[in-house]
Image (cartoon, grey):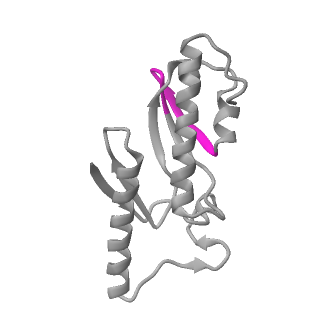
């Protein structure tokens, strides 16, 4: 896995973890390990993130209030990419389409307020299972109305 960090842009810290295999558990565990290490460093330097008891981590971007965690992933889904209800399908699963190029959907989680990091990762995993089922059904010319 490739790991990078970008500081002081829209967010205080943006971690980037890229992994070529479809293994969300591995990437999440890597994130948790790095997050714990980063908090230890902040604690040693007597620093911390600004945290509100109800809103979670306070960031410079209101979009990321709460845990501050968003997860981006890319999936190849040519049938879903062409589907008329794609935006609705994604919104229902708390996902946003960032880009759609060459049948590759770049997706991002959108709800952070009131959710833990674990819940966001779990919701993404469940959404990806649903999207995979829809893509397979559309490839066989079957309707996906029950799954939507």
- Nearest the camera: 120 or 44? 120
Tell me residue 52's x, y (percent). Answer: 62, 78
Residue at 63 percent of width and 54 percent of height: 111
Residue 140's place in the image compared with 6, above or below, is: above
Instruction: State the quadrant of the C terminus.
Output: top right
| Placement of 132 over or under 136, stated as above or below | below
Instruction: Left or right? Give the position of 16 relative to 129.
Output: left
How many numbered dots are placed on residues in this image? 0
Vertical placement of residue 48 versus 90, above or below: below
Residue 42 percent coordinates (x, y): 37, 81
* Residue at image coords 38%, 68%: 35
Q: Which residues are magenta?
A: 94-105
Residue at far top of view: 141
Residue positioned most to the left: 1
Q: Position of residue 81 (x, y in %)?
A: 56, 23
Magenta includes 98?
Answer: yes
Q: Is residue 32 magenta?
A: no
Res 68 seen here:
no
Identity of the residue drawn at 52% across and 33% down: 99
Q: Position of residue 144 (x, y in %)?
A: 67, 22
Note whether residue 102 is visible.
yes
Q: Residue at x 58, y 72 (%)?
A: 58
Principal SS element in the magenta part?
strand
Which sits in the foreground, 65 or 124? 124
Q: Residue 9 vs residue 53: left or right?
A: left
Q: Nearer the viewer, residue 69 or 144?
A: 144
Camera-nearest residue between 144 and 40: 144
């Amino acid at each position: 896995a490739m790991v990078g960090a970008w500081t002081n842009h829209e967010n205080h810290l943006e971690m980037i973890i890229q992994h070529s295999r479809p293994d969300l558990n591995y990437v999440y565990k890597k994130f948790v390990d790095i997050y714990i290490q980063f908090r230890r460093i902040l604690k040693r330097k007597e620093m911390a993130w600004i945290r509100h008891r109800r809103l979670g981590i306070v960031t410079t971007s209101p979009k990321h209030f709460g845990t501050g965690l968003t997860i981006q992933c890319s999936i190849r889904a040519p049938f879903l990419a062409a589907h008329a209800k794609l935006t609705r399908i994604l919104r229902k699963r708390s996902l946003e389409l960032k880009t759609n190029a060459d049948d590759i959907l770049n997706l991002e989680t959108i709800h952070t307020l009131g959710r833990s990091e674990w819940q966001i990762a779990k919701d993404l995993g469940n959404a990806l299972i649903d999207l995979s089922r829809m893509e397979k059904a559309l490839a066989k010319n079957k309707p996906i109305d029950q799954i939507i």
